[in-house]
Amino acid sequence: MIIGIDASNIREGGGVTHLKALLEHVNTSNTGFSAIVLWSSQATLNQFPDYPFLKKKTHFLLNKSTLYTFLFQLFYLKKEAKDCEVIFVPGGTFISRFRPFVTMSQNMLPFEKEEAKAYGLKMRWRLKILYYTQSYTFKRANGLIFLTQYARNYITQILKKGNTSSTIIPHGVHNSFQLAPRVQKKATAYSRDTPFEFLYVSYITVYKHQWNIAEAVCQLHQKGVPIKLKLIGSVLDSFEKLQAVLESYPNSKECIEYIGAIPHQDLSFHYHTADSFVFGSTCENLPIILLEAMNAGLPIASSNYGPMGELLGSSAVYFNPKKVASVKSALQILFENHELRQLIASNVYNKGVLYSWQYCANKTFKYIVDSAIAYKTKTK
């Protein structure tokens, strides 16, 4: 069986990381396919290694803005994919007449309308378009992959979709992040000169609430609690909110360290040298960042929104990221109780190591092949 992958709207970031991991870790001998044809822009294709089973193809429309990908799907893809028995669409939007196809849900933001309201008009329109295109795609798909039970319940309730087959296949984590939990020190072991470090890795945008985390840390630091916050990630929007907090607290330079975007392969060092991890997002499907922190054996203070409870269970100190007082309380509890930190770190590490790219890749391609066989049987 030849599988096509329409990665026409995948250009960078997590989408590329996910697809690269699938191709790197799939076991081609027992997943039921003989070759894969991958369509995307040339710049995206250049990020993928060469594999014997992989044929990389581009098109002049795929090397323009993402709007042109709709034209490629609508007018060219069906003919281009004439030798394929199924197409996988990891980007979640597909308007081609080709059948069968399997897609996946990776972005909750178009469906969580309350979160979308926090953006400006241009972004809200973009999210509305994504809502309609992805809803249209999900309802027509021959197979639909969700990353968490939370996402499946939330989206299927909104769409009230009919008989589309669906499954849950979580992402994996690269082995470089894995590090057994360290022995947790008592709070008295830390001082202003050697503070307890909370790490928060994520791009800065409305629903990540970095400014509230930063304000909670500044307030605790003002009270004499020897902690600091390291923020890593590029800026999508809302940096002025973080900047306003940093400017309003004279001590922010002592307790807040902001690092911009860094290569993904360099992140593990920061996970392995941090004392704890904090995650303040209110809109997630399956945050790989959180899985990385779990694999790194870090005690975690987490947002109480979305799928975080599904991933962490009772192994976290939860807070409401929209309320500084709630964040502050959670961070203080985690800092002051080294035995709680030890328990959380051990538990999340044991949960985190179960998320592997080998499992994800093999389950994904088997589901794609099975969906193609089911469609062929049904249409005979």
Image: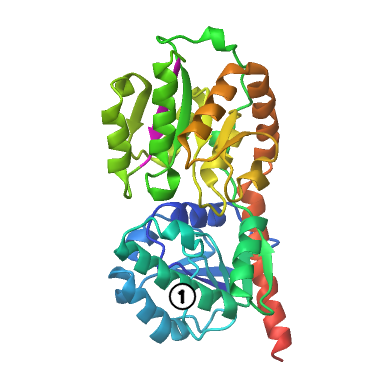
Q: Position of residue 340 (x, y in %)?
A: 67, 22
Mark 1 falls on what kind of element? Answer: helix
Residue at 37% over, 21% down: 255
157 is higher (above) or lower (below) than 139 = above
Q: Which residues are magenta?
A: 226-233
Asked whether the viewer can see residue 369, the reply is: yes
| 338 left or right of 251 in image | right
Quadrant in which the N terminus is drawn: bottom right
- Label 1 sits on what residue type? Thr
Q: Main secondary structure of the magenta part?
A: strand
Residue at 41% over, 18% down: 221
Residue 232 magenta-highlighted: yes
Residue at 30% over, 65% down: 122
Residue 379 magenta-highlighted: no
Q: Position of residue 108 (x, y in %)?
A: 51, 59
Quadrant in which the C terminus is drawn: bottom right
Count the marks.
Answer: 1
Q: Which residue is mark 1?
A: 133
| 281 left or right of 178 in image | left
260 is higher (above) or lower (below) than 272 = below
Q: Position of residue 245 (x, y in %)?
A: 32, 33
Tag 1: Cα neighbours inside 10 Å, few (<14), some, or many (≥20)?
Answer: some
The quadrant in which residue 265 appears is top left
Asked whether the viewer can see residue 101, the reply is: no
Q: Position of residue 174 (x, y in %)?
A: 55, 42
Which of these two is toward me, 84 or 282?
Answer: 282
